[in-house]
Image (cartoon, rainbow, N blue to C red):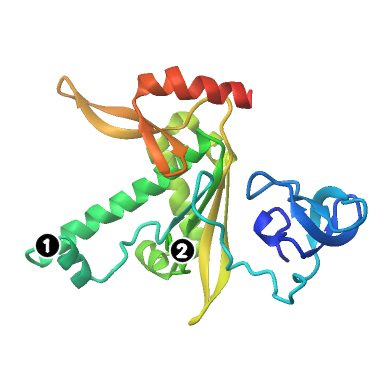
Amino acid sequence: MIDPRESINCKPGTLVKLRTGEIGRVRQILAVLDFHPLGTKVNLDDENETEGRVDEVIGPKINGEQNSVTEFPDEGLTIEYKGSFSVPLGTDEEIKIKYNLPNDNAIKYKIKELKDILRFSVMKTIAAFANTDGGTLYIGIKDRTKEILGLDEDYKENNCDSDGLITEIQNKMRKIFGDSYGGAILSILEMKTYEGNTNSGKKEYLKIRVKAVKNHPLSLKVDGIIKGEKIKIPKFYYRTSNGSEELPVSDFYETHWPEHSAKYN
């Protein structure tokens, strides 16, 4: 079933059924965000330009092209793509050349470092979405080209299937966001794998939908040392059209968070 909550599945010309029962082809998408839990808001191509939220996507667009889960929106304020959760793109030789590494030990060390960076980057994006207007993170899809790379390498790296990968990401969130947030972190997320068509067959990708937090900002807890003592230092991120940006703690609470709180409370 095509997800009616995704605006990309409700393009003009698509035959849909509204929650109020009317059936017709979409004239215009009225939704501001790419996802809404109650269905994409549209108006129909009828004499009354009937407005409502889509309950079911019935048929293809007028030109006969099927709605496709492999059509993806452009990256921006509420959309980001990552090729992998934990596996650097490219072969060992490509990594060696890219980073001018001298030997196999240097390659192994660099790959381990890149894996940590990738995992941290996913957490950073989730926090930035949560601290701004929410958003959708796709994993297993290359940015810019939006080529579906799949999750096979992540499954191998973590010795898991799709459910296991979701669990692995959840465990990473608990660790890096801190125990104080507990289940509250998971309550703002929806994670699910989908299949997309590629030239080499179907490949799975992961979609993480993040809701905006209301009462408390989401911060990443990273290791630090102050006066010789190991502590956890909070890092705060917010979303811009160019990606996820860090703000110093004082700036975050003085500028960004008051505006965010006023919007969502």
Q: Position of residue 63 (x, y in %)?
A: 74, 75
Identify the residue shown where x is 19% and y is 57%. 110
Look at mark 1 in the image and give the residue it sits on.
Answer: 100
Q: Position of residue 192 (x, y in %)?
A: 58, 57
Mark 1 or 2 closer to N-term? 1
Q: Is residue 40 above or below residue 226?
A: below
Identify the residue shown where x is 36% and y is 23%. 249
Q: Quadrant of residue 215?
A: top right
**Mark 1 and mark 2: Cα distance apart in space:** 26 Å
Q: Which of the image's four quarters has the N terminus?
A: bottom right
Q: Is residue 140 above or below residue 135?
A: below
Amino acid type, label 2: Ile
Amino acid type, label 1: Asn
Mark 2 nearby-residue class (10 Å; few <14, some 14–19, many ≥20)? many
Q: Quadrant of residue 235?
A: top left
Q: Residue furthest front?
A: 47
Secondary structure at badge 2 equals: loop
Identify the residue shown where x is 11% and y is 62%. 101
Left or right, 175 with respect to 1, comes to left
Identify the residue shown where x is 56% and y is 37%. 133
Look at mark 2 in the image and give the residue it sits on.
Answer: 141
